[in-house]
């Protein structure tokens, strides 16, 4: 019989995998948002990123030894959240997210620099854990794979005259949501590991 913890982790993984197609379907068939910037899929992406950021900030506050490491991760996801909010920040002025992202990055580096030695040691400690693997897979899926697999340069030659941009958008945004969901799971598992002072 599988341990309860393993069953819970497997169940959470299934939920995270099912959310993107379900939300893309809701956006397309019910809300009729066409997975635009103002859609359930996009809002959930931002929610996942902000939650991940919050988990890392909370963990940094509670873990003196790994404070620099978790502060760095929190700042990284805050910058991603700013980038994901570019549509709304654009109402202030076009490209307004860029200086905000730069400020977020500089503040994070300023906070982490005095603890750079401990930060690197913490990275080595968590690098080979399944928690950090979740995080890395989520980031690669969102920042790399979704951009490549969701590009019009791939789907236009395949679909020819049947190509519609909404199809590409739905694939890309769905993959991004999946990646952010996996990163959120990774952040939760990393936080638990830090709390228990055990690298899993």
Image (cartoon, rainbow, N blue to C red):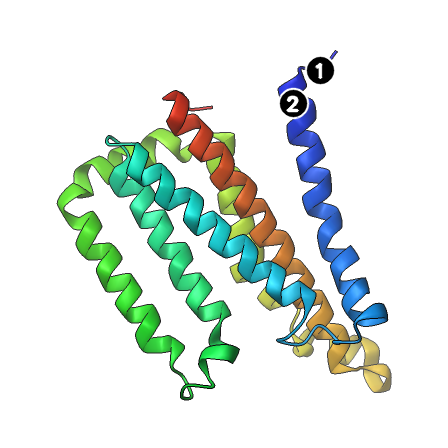
Find residue 6 and name its label: 2
Q: Residue furthest left?
A: 114
| Residues under numbered marks 1 and 2 in contact, where contact means CB atoms less than 8 Å apart | yes
Find residue 154 and name its label: none
Which residue is disc 1 drawn over? Answer: 2
Q: Dot 1 lies on which element? A: loop
| Image location (x, y in percent) of residue 160 | 82, 83
Q: How crowded is the residue under tag 2: few (<14 C-alpha within 10 Å), some, or many (20+)?
A: few
Quarter of image, res 14:
top right
Residue at image point 74% right, 76% down: 33
Q: How crowded is the residue under tag 1: few (<14 C-alpha within 10 Å), some, or many (20+)?
A: few
190 lies above or below 99: above
| Image location (x, y in percent) of residue 146 | 61, 63
Quarter of image, res 161:
bottom right
Residue at image point 79% right, 71% down: 31
Residue 149 appears anywhere in the view: no
Toward the viewer: 131 or 96? 96
Relative horizontal placement of residue 58, taking residue 134 as reference (left or right) = left
| Image location (x, y in percent) of residue 133 | 51, 38
Residue at image point 75% right, 78% down: 166
């Amino acid at each position: 019989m599988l341990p309860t913890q393993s069953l819970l982790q497997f169940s959470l993984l299934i939920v995270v995998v099912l959310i993107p197609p379900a939300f893309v379907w809701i956006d397309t068939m019910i809300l009729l948002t066409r997975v635009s910037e103002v859609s359930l899929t996009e809002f959930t992406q931002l929610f996942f990123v902000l939650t991940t950021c919050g988990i890392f900030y909370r963990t940094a506050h509670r873990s003196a030894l790994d404070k620099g490491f978790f502060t760095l991760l929190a700042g990284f996801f805050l910058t991603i959240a700013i980038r994901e909010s570019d549509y709304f920040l654009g109402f202030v002025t076009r490209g307004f997210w860029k200086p905000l992202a730069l400020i977020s990055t500089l503040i994070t580096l300023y906070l982490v620099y005095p603890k750079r030695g401990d930060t690197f040691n913490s990275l080595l400690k968590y690098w080979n854990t399944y928690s950090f693997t979740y995080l890395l897979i989520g980031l690669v899926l969102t920042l790399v794979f979704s951009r490549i697999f969701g590009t019009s340069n791939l789907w236009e030659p395949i679909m020819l005259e049947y190509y519609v941009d909404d199809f590409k958008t739905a694939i890309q945004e769905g993959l991004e949501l999946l990646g952010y969901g996996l990163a959120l799971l990774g952040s939760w598992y990393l936080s638990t590991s830090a709390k228990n002072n055990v690298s899993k």
